[in-house]
Image (cartoon, rainbow, N blue to C red):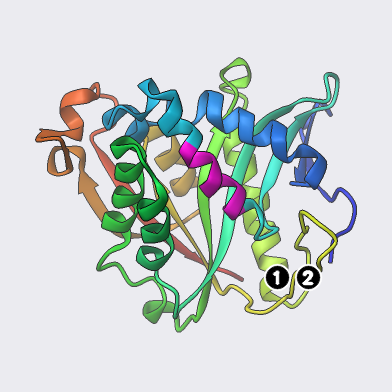
Amino acid sequence: MSKEKRVWATSEEGKIEYVSLTPDRLDETVQLLRNYFFTRETVCEAVGLSKIPEAIAECNEVVIDTAKHGVSVVAIDKESGKVIGALMNKIQDKNTSSKQLYEEFIKKAKHPESKEIFNYLITMEDGADPFTPYNADCMMELVFLCVSPDYAQKGIGYMLCKVSLDLANLLSKGENVKTPLDNTPLPLEPKPQIVTVLWTTFKSQRIGRKLNFNHLKTVSYEDLYYNGKSYASNLGNETKFCIFECKKLQ
């Protein structure tokens, strides 16, 4: 069990450090996602979440709940000491569906835009079974990937995904590298055998190719609707579909 900051990687020039999310970084990380994920991410833009601050605030609960799994990672600018990127990850066993998890948040949410984000997550994972093909009973899901626009085009998103795979691989081999947000130890079990992810932009989909993820499901934004309009009608032409993918751990 990790009690102190665990460094997973450092950029070639030594300016950016990739570490496990620790309690002292949680508020800053939540704010990063609030500022740059929920206001800029493709699906958030498609359903209008980015224009409703109150709806964005409701999503903070999901971010914090995800962080409690102890398997999220952040990128730190060593000079400024600021969190400049984050990948929030969670552990999920075969007997707990995403529908069960997200329906609880849908019941609590007051804004239709935040409800739709969770409905989207349920829709994308519905009918796609990542467990059976790999004879797995537990997965780690890469949920919220965010990089400050001031640090774009530096490969930070790729590195956050790569070190998350490194973390998941150690868990699968029996090394408890989870980092709790309080003084309560997190159990090693269940150990993930696979990692899953929803890639919603062409840029993140490139990361999936580089890291050799395997395809599970593709859905066109033309086929996803909110308030009677397709997601695609609110988006540009850069990304036309989203992909649900999986990777078996070594």
Q: Are marks 1 and 2 in contact (CB under 8 Å)?
A: yes
Calculate the distance from the C-alpha at mark 1 to the C-alpha at mark 2: 6 Å
Spot occupied by residue 188 in the image (x, y as percentages of width and height): 73, 75
Outermost top residue: 150
Q: Residue at x 18, y 43 (%)?
A: 224
* Residue closer to the observer: 165 or 123: 123
The residue under the point 54% across, 46% down is: 61
Mark 2: give few (<14), some (14-19) or many (20+) Cα within 10 Å: some
Secondary-structure class at tag 1: helix
Q: Residue 180 carries which label?
A: none
Q: Residue at x 82, y 40 (%)?
A: 24
Where is residue 247? Give x, y as percent.
48, 63
What is the number of callouts on the image?
2
* Residue at which label 2 appears: 176
Say whether residue 39 is visible: no
Query: Which residue appears at 45% of the width and 78% of the height?
Result: 94
Q: What stretch is highlighted in magenta?
A: 58-66
- Three-letter code for the amino acid on which mark 1 is drawn: Leu
Nearer the N terminus, badge 1 or badge 2?
Answer: 1
Residue bearing mark 1: 171
Q: Is residue 24 above or below residue 177?
A: above
Q: What element carries label 2?
A: loop
| Residue 62 is one of the magenta-drawn residues | yes
